[in-house]
Amino acid sequence: MERGTLSYILHLPRMQSPKSEYMELLFDRLEDIAAFTEFNTSNLKSFGHRTRELLALACMEVEASLRAVLRASGSFSGRDRFNMNDYVRACEPLCLREFQVTLRRHPNVGPLRPFQSWDIKQPTASLPWYDAYNATKHDRETALDRATLEACLQAMAAVTILFCAQFSPPVTADWTHEPAYALNRWFTVELIDPDPASFYVPPVRVELGRTPELWLFDGRGTGTWNVMDLCVP
């Protein structure tokens, strides 16, 4: 896990795994909805089978990402099944409440902070968008109106945040690698009042022959370092 660096590209094979291709498909579905529904505050409560479909797919990706994080932490070795009581334990270590996402093309919709209200005492009910997915999954007939455009956008913001929490936010100039390209095309990501103590800066390696006063730095200039293991209590 990396935080506050530009070196997510070092994880390119993992970032471009089949799981990341799934993210690209989610953004394609979001594009389809945008072709028929204007993304503005007046339409946030609109709902239908397409929004229910995307909400379900996005929430399943959120679950998959959190499951991968929990397994990577080593605190859940041997576990095959997880639930929201488990997933919420990753909120603090990943600093998920600090992330804010804004739609590039539709800033009037407002900032999205899907994990801001996540409460360990009510891990499902404290996330309205996930609670809506849970309701429509079990009772589509009576709960379809909860699969709103707003819930979809919050769920897609959650997918984006979990990607950034694992691989670091993609640099704005990265319009080449997927799913960073799709993410940059749709969203801007920022941290709100982050704790500076949660950041770490890798050592910088200056190659021989470089002028130390002025030189271009990117992830390739990162020196050898040991990343601290993720700890999920």
Image (cartoon, rainbow, N blue to C red):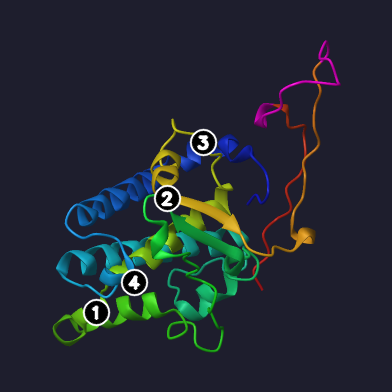
In the image, is residue 138 above or below residue 188? below
User: Is disc 2 placed on a helix, strand or loop?
Assistant: loop
Closer to the chain start, of discs 1 and 3, is 3
Residue at 43 percent of width and 61 percent of height: 157
**Viewer-nearest of discs 3 and 4:** 4
User: Residue flagged by tag 2: what amino acid is it?
Assistant: Arg
User: Residue flagged by tag 1: what amino acid is it?
Assistant: Thr
**Viewer-nearest of discs 4 and 1:** 4
Query: Is 130 or 108 nearer to us in this picture?
Result: 108
Report the residue marked by disc 1: 136
Q: Residue 183: percent from the left, percent from the top?
A: 42, 46
Report the residue marked by disc 3: 12
In the image, is residue 46 above or below residue 17? below
User: Residue flagged by tag 3: what amino acid is it?
Assistant: Leu
Closer to the chain start, of discs 4 and 1, is 1
**In 3D space, how far apart are the residues under numbered discs 2 and 1 (Cα atoms)?**
28 Å
**In 3D space, how far apart are the residues under numbered discs 4 and 2 (Cα atoms)?**
18 Å
Q: Residue 77: percent from the left, percent from the top?
A: 56, 65
Q: Residue 18: percent from the left, percent from the top?
A: 36, 44
**Viewer-nearest of discs 4 and 2:** 2
Residue at 51 percent of width and 71 percent of height: 115
Report the residue marked by disc 2: 104
Picture disc at residue 151: 4
Q: Does the residue at mark 4 contact the one at mark 2 (Cβ under 8 Å)?
A: no
Q: Residue 119: percent from the left, percent from the top?
A: 55, 83
**In 3D space, how far apart are the residues under numbered discs 1 and 3 (Cα atoms)?**
35 Å
